Image (tube, rainbow, N blue to C red):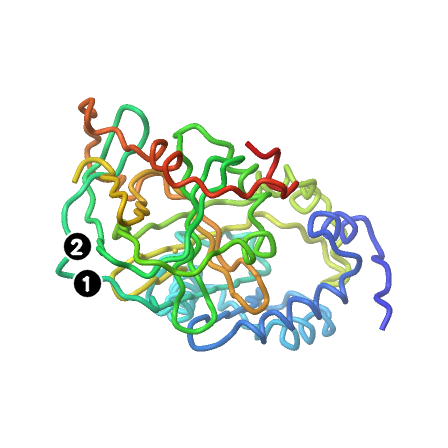
Amino acid sequence: GQCPKSANQTEKRLLEALHLESVPCLHHLLSSIRRQLTGSMLSVASRVYLQKGFEVKEKFLENSERFYGAKPMILSGNNENDLIAINKWIKEATEGQISTFLDQLPASTVMLLLNAVHFQGFWRHKFDPSQTGPDVFHLDDQFIVPIEMMKAQKYSLSWFTLDPLEVQVARFPFKGNMSFVAIVPNQFKWNVSQVLVNLSHDKLHSRFPKEKPTMVKMPKLHVDYQLELNQVLSQLGLGELFSTPDLQKITDEPLFVSSIQHQSTLELAEDGVEASAATSVMMSRSLSTFSLNQPFLFIIFEETTGIPLFVGSIQNPNPSAAQQKKEPQDSPTLKNAIKNKSTNVGGYKEWGDPV
């Protein structure tokens, strides 16, 4: 049916940021996506914590449970115990990947909305652990860091080069209907936003050629990332949420958002991915090479819906290691590789002007 228009300014701002027309449409869309995506590899969990005695409208609680499976829980009022309970729930929902989500619970907290996503994918073509060994990752033109690199001499891989954006794109499929798409630029200074705008699932899907035996190098890594989203969301025009929002559909009591926290983890290993995700590239003319030995972007796609579940940028897979100054022969030869292995995709306006 027709989705009704939004009622107040806060709703309008949220819908503009999400490029949607109404809140009921958003609820149904997100609920539908949650049902489609939740399977053996992906779990999504939500929960609402409320201060004892805080009056919340029944309709809000009903919708939270109906659309997002978020059961309301009452905070005990003992900060230490509440913190332990919240972190325990997050740990269970992410299967141990995120063990400490909150360090403290502000005394003024009346409501806490939590959402946890855990993804575990297994490569369709696994890496042989006996081939994993020490290697280097090129941080920029000057520095490298030591890493453990997974290697395969003849990995069945679908990949191509996009000349206008000067990037190589490869798809590593998981068992099931998910895939890990890696995007490697041929230079260290690049516009991540511009590349992402041009790399939607629809634009990529038809470009991937047939898999071919490829020499592959992929860093073995475990990355943790934490960010308070207040500033990012304010830049998207949602600053009102943190000052004087209209949240009367939740409660008649005064209410504003004090903080929105995000934490994610990604692990790449020989068996596959868990997310909550030699010193130079040697080119062989007889065998194509795809190497993730310098900063790269990744997108984990659900292939049937085309939904990007995780989008990330790996700048340094081993931040705790000491950076080393490069010797002249250490520089990666990806630029030459792109020239040698160029695939012309000219004529597609969305990629920019053909080279």
Q: Residue at x 53, y 40 (%)?
A: 195
Q: Residue at x 54, y 35 (%)?
A: 164
Question: In the drawing, what numbered circle is on residue 128?
Answer: 1
* 186 w.r.t. 113: above or below: above
Q: Where residue 119 sits in the image (x, y, percent)?
A: 42, 66
Q: Where residue 112 sits in the image (x, y, percent)?
A: 56, 60
Q: Residue at x 24, y 62 (%)?
A: 127
Q: Which residue, given by chain and number where applicable, does mark 2 sit on?
A: 132
Q: Which of 49 and 297 lies nearest the eye of the viewer? A: 297
Q: Quadrant of residue 36?
A: bottom right
- Whether pointer 2 and pointer 1 mark residues with C-beta atoms closer than 8 Å, the reply is yes
* 345 w.r.t. 203: above or below: above
Q: Quadrant of residue 333?
A: top left
Q: Where residue 46 sits in the image (x, y, percent)?
A: 54, 68
Q: Which of 160 and 6 lies nearest the eye of the viewer? A: 160
Q: Would residue 87 be found to the left or right of residue 238 on screen? A: left
Q: Quadrant of residue 132?
A: bottom left
Label 1 crowd (10 A; few <14 / some 14-19 / many >=20): few
Classify mark 1: helix, strand or loop: loop
Q: Which of 97 and 49 lies nearest the eye of the viewer? A: 97
Q: CA distance from mark 2 to mark 1?
A: 7 Å
Image quadrant for the N terminus? bottom right
Q: Which amino acid type is shown beneath numbered disc 1?
A: Asp
Question: In the drawing, what numbered circle is on residue 96?
Answer: none
Image quadrant for the C terminus? top right
Q: Which amino acid type is shown beneath numbered disc 2?
A: Thr
Q: Would residue 335 be found to the left or right of residue 75 on screen? A: left
Q: Where residue 135 sits in the image (x, y, percent)?
A: 18, 42
The extreme front residue here reads 286
Classify mark 2: helix, strand or loop: loop
Label 2 crowd (10 A; few <14 / some 14-19 / many >=20): some
